Amino acid sequence: MKKELSRTYHRYLKNRDSLLDQRNGRFGLSARGLWVGAFLSLYLAVGAPYVRMAMRSTVMAFDFNTPGAIFLFLVLVGLLNVLFKVVGRSRERALVAAVGAVGLFLAWYGPRGELDFHSPGLLFNLFIVSSILINLLLVWNGLTLVLNRAELVLVYVMLLVVSALCTMGMSQQLLPGITAFFYYASPENKWLEKLLPHLPPHQVLVNDGRENRAFYEGAAGLEINYGAWVEPLCWWAIFLLALYAVMVSAAVILRRQWMERERLAYPLTQVGLALVAGEEKEGLVNGLFRKRAFWCGTAIPLLVGSLTALHHYDSSVPTLNLHWTSPFVGQQSLQFSVRFAMIGFSYLINTQVAAGLWLFHLLSKVEYETLLVTGVQADQRFVYGVHEHALLAYQGGGALIAMVLLGFWIGRAHLKAVLAKALGRAPEVDDSDEIMSYRSAVIGLVGGSIAMSIWLWIMGTKLWVALLFVGLAVLIFVGITRVVAEAGLAAVRSPMIAPDLVMQGLGSQLVGASGVFNLSLAYIWCGDIRIFVMAVLANGLKLIEEMDRKSRRYVFWGIVLALLIGAVGSCWMVFHLVHIHGGINLDGWRFKSGPLTIFDRAVHNLEPSGVYWQGWGFFAGGGVAMILLTWARQRLLWWPFHPVGFPIGANMLMNHIWFSVFIAWSIKKAILRFGGASVYRASEAFFLGLIMGEALCNGLWVVIDYFTGKMGNVVFAIG
């Protein structure tokens, strides 16, 4: 039977813009949205590295839950937009606010003399003063700086994009990765002996002539050699530009299939959607903030997290233990961790998806123990992904790739339509609701992939290895993006990463020595991928359903601006901090263990090796199992478990979040059974409160610690 969308639903999607216009009164993008989005993006880009490195506080942009973006969006909706509404009601109010803001700024910073433009506090205050002055000019001409729904969507999408770049996703991986070789090289690790002959013919690593000591130990008494950074950063800028073009294009191509045809849940977007939907032209306070259930949910993590934060100030303040460990099977143990945001996200997904997540994690423990008992062990070891057992990593990798390919097969009609539209052979296909045309998206995907492959080839990698590697990397990115969009996992890693799959799966004899070195450098951008542009952008594109079609094309340029601000701003802050304090004094993993992994693994993988057939056997087995599970899901009506949990079940991060998923699943099952759909809808605000309460608690205590000078105050720890 042919399955397709009903004509009624097609009409709904086509007329959605007019419905939004009627509901909101004015709905379009303007320069004010770009102004607010650009500044908040810059603030997150420089603030998140500062919080992580200088304050050693709660990370604000580490995983897909993006607490920094949520907190700043809460500040925008709950404070700034309200402020703009109040002072924009008359010229007198706008004038008083402008005079007061300028006066307070001069009174606070005037006596201090020279201003430190690296200070996040100064940047935020400059934004407030500038915005109030801009608002005065607008009010004088009958306008206001109040953001409408479309502009709020633009700001939130930009914040999500920056979250994927400002710490874990790019800057704190790139800069240490390209500087560590000459600083940590020693006779003991044999880097110079074994790796130096295989360095790329072009300068992609930084060598300032002093072993990069200024970067790792601080530049006190040393002159910073800025020239040594120019060529490496230019080469990496070319590669990363191609990578992000591929990610943006892939997200655009898959958007309609995932959102309109398969109707994925996108739990991580529900916070932004709820805040945008609650914003009204006439109302002063956002509609979500008027719900009692929301504040009940917000209060729980706010209270628990505040006790933890206060305990770091005064050890006599009691705290609540939210983490336990219990024996499970044989040598295996289970971690029971209560994570409020994860409970909130998991409550918004399908119960079969949630059941699949926690069940396959438990089954992975059983399988791990079975392999130990039977003596089936691997002679390979990984650092990322499923590092405890390499064979389970291969199995998960095969399942993930199979899931992506099955998704392509299911969506083949849409993909054919996209390609036909790109080639000019399908004028009936409408892509006006996308942020870019399908032709541009296909060019970006294909052209970016070719550019990445050529980059690797120029650096000495065999062309067929480069093409295979880039293809596998893109498939893995798509797979994890699918998991995030469907399962709402705020913290997830790929079971196996592309460099390990190619280098250790095929062996150094096939990959070649130069290829091994170059693919080891790929750990920078596809190693510890706990957050990346494609996944956060896929979530962001869910939000554009709340925008009129005309405004959607402008979102693309907002994304481009966010990529530029996120990359440059975060690298600027990281560069500044390490030359003041020294990288090794700021973050032990990012500036030592992580970079050491790149080159130690390169040395290890240079050892002569062939194809790892045992691993590929588990890879194929994982793919076959994923196909069978998908078949059962689609053909057996009684089948209760979604297969999306199978590829990631053995992932280390699942140890920390499976119990929270189980709690949410249990509560939702009970509510749906005994309360029905109406009670479930009413309860959603409570679980949105859990998510926002955790982000709000993180952000508030970061602000408090900034003013008090407190360091190391981690409220909600990550896995």
Image (tube, helix red, strand yellow):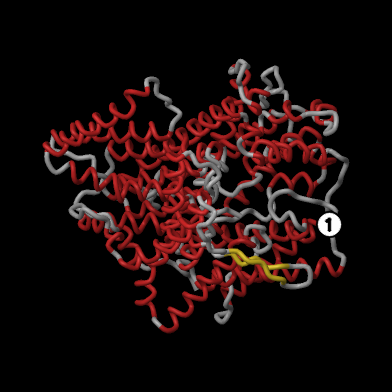
Q: Name which quarter of the figure residue 327 lies in.
A: bottom right
Lateral position of residue 241 relative to residue 672, left or right: right
Element at label 1: loop
Closest to the observer: 477 or 141? Answer: 141
Lateral position of residue 384 relative to residue 115, left or right: right
Tell me if I can see residue 425 in this picture: no
Q: Name which quarter of the figure residue 605 lies in.
A: top right
Lateral position of residue 602 relative to residue 77, left or right: right
The residue located at (61%, 69%) in the rendering is 358
For the image, the number of numbered tags is 1
Q: Name which quarter of the figure residue 277 lies in.
A: bottom left
Picture coordinates of residue 573, whole percent (x, y): 51, 31
Q: Residue furthest front?
A: 316
Picture coordinates of residue 96, whole percent (x, y): 16, 35
The residue located at (38%, 77%) in the rendering is 677
Lateral position of residue 342 relative to residue 548, left or right: right
Closest to the observer: 245 or 696? Answer: 696
Q: Quadrant of the C terminus?
A: bottom right
User: 705 above or below 184?
Assistant: below
In the image, what residue type sits under mark 1?
A: Ala
Tell me if I can see residue 236 in this picture: yes
Question: Which residue position holds label 1?
Answer: 378
The residue located at (26%, 32%) in the rendering is 104
Picture coordinates of residue 15, whole percent (x, y): 27, 58
Q: How many C-alpha atoms fall within 10 Å of the one at disc 1: few (<14), some, or many (≥20)? A: some
Picture coordinates of residue 338, whole percent (x, y): 55, 65
Closest to the observer: 117 or 535? Answer: 117
Closest to the observer: 306 or 690? Answer: 306
